[in-house]
Image (cartoon, rainbow, N blue to C red):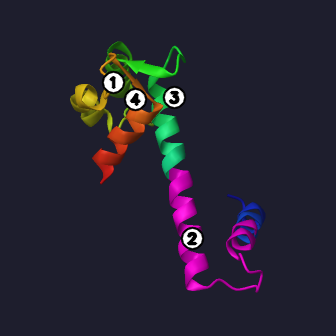
Amino acid sequence: LPPRKAEAVAGATFAKADVDGDAGLSWLECQFAVMMMVENRWKSMVAAIFDDMDKNADGRISRREVLAAQRRRNDDPSGPSSGLLPQILDGFVAADWDMDGYLDHREVAGLVDRLLT
């Protein structure tokens, strides 16, 4: 980020975290701010992986789309789902909790959570 934008973002983040408005962050306010940043990043990462793989935008990922993502990964290893794709392929059946042959947002989030923890 350019310096001015980074400063504006930092100021807005601090103001949001300073719940009691005392112009300082308590330990609890700091913990809350970090948890919110991690949660937002987590949601963004899952959304990027899902969108990268759900090429027909029907809100679910088929095995065919997972295999197509694997082929794209071979061509461009820097895509959003590239780092976790082998594990997603291996875990497709286990992640398909409702056994409908597709992964929805909830199932992808659960799979990514298991892979990262």
Give the label, 1 or 2, closer to the camera: 1
**Which residue bears the numbered disc 2?**
32
Image quarter for residue 61? top left
Tag in front: 3 or 4:
3
Residue hosting label 1: 98
For badge 2, the amino acid type reads: Phe
How crowded pointer 2 is (Cα within 10 Å; few <14, some 14-19, many 20+) is rated as some
The image's mark for residue 76 is: 4
Q: Which mark is residue 5?
A: none
Q: Secondary structure at mark 4?
A: loop
Q: Earlier in the sequence, mark 3 or mark 4?
A: 3
Q: Secondary structure at mark 3?
A: helix
Magenta region, residue range: 12-41
How would you rate the neighbour count of disc 3 (Cα within 10 Å): few for under 14, some for 14-19, many for 20 or more?
some
Which secondary structure, mark 2?
A: helix
Principal secondary structure, stretch drawn in magenta: helix
